[in-house]
Amino acid sequence: KPCPPDVFAKALDAGIAQYRLIKAERDLLSKTFIASIKVLTDLLSAVSPLAFGKASRVRQLVRQLCAELGLKDWQVEVAAMLSQIGCVSIPEQILAKAYEGKELTAAERRTFDAYPLAGGQLIAGVPRLEEVAEIITYQQQHYDGGGVAGDGRRGGDIPPGSRILKVALDFDTLVSAGYSNETALAEINDRPGRYDPSVVAALGRVLAITHAQVIRRVKISALVDGLTLADDIKTTN
């Protein structure tokens, strides 16, 4: 100050031009980013309808869990959408068995267990999806450090999105296997060490389930006071 009018006008013009350039670049990146996600989801839908269907169901549940937990990171929902992208090379018959909770052979288990790491590596190459790739990589990691990816990361060191995705994926598998919402939640509660307790509690609130019981097949001799029968007991005599 004082600033000559012509100098001030040139500075304003330069600032406006720079703003328009940055905005144009941001818009281009945004459109490219959205297009990249759409290409990946379209690829999943075309190559593996089973995997795409699971991802679509899980995405809805993940969205509800995030809202219940007050988590607003867009990366978690995108990770849910792309969670099964690593399954594109897995035969449909293996996916069908895994998604329905059926027993896999050792070879089938090795093939299926590789999908989180494969998906994470694929997504890691897309700009702005680095956090999404990490969530996908750890989607089958147990809260106590077991499971896949198997590097021992546990508890709060596992990305929050991965902990949410793990609960949503396993719940969907149980429901696909014929469990009711109540028994699926009970089964998850009966697997200590696998899940973040806060996410399991949020699942109960989302499903509006305050109490759930686990159903187990036992011998009559194993019945004790306090158990509840799920079916009538029938004997030959």
Image: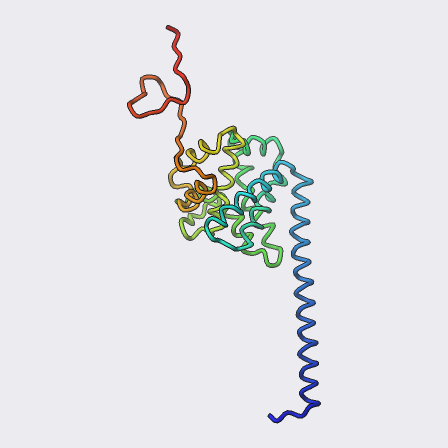
Instruction: Farthest residue to the left: give it.
Output: 225
Relative vertical location of residue 162 with respect to residue 49 in this rendering, above or below: below
Left/right placement of residue 180 relative to residue 212 reads right
Q: Position of residue 175 (x, y in %)?
A: 51, 33
Vertical placement of residue 193 versus 69, above or below: above
Q: Position of residue 110 (x, y in %)?
A: 53, 37
Q: Quadrant of the C terminus?
A: top left
* Quarter of the view holding residue 47: top right
Marks counted in the figure total 0
Residue projecting furthest to the top: 237
Residue at 66% x, 79% y: name it.
15
The quarter holding residue 90 reads top right
Q: Residue at x 32, y 21 (%)?
A: 223
> Measured from the top left, where is residue 179 in percent x and y?
49, 30
Image quarter where the N terminus lies is: bottom right
Q: How is the image coloured?
A: rainbow
Relative image position of residue 161 (x, y in whole percent) = 49, 50
197 vs 6, left or right, is left
Query: Which residue is depicted at the point 38% across and 10% down?
Result: 235
131 vs 147, left or right, is right
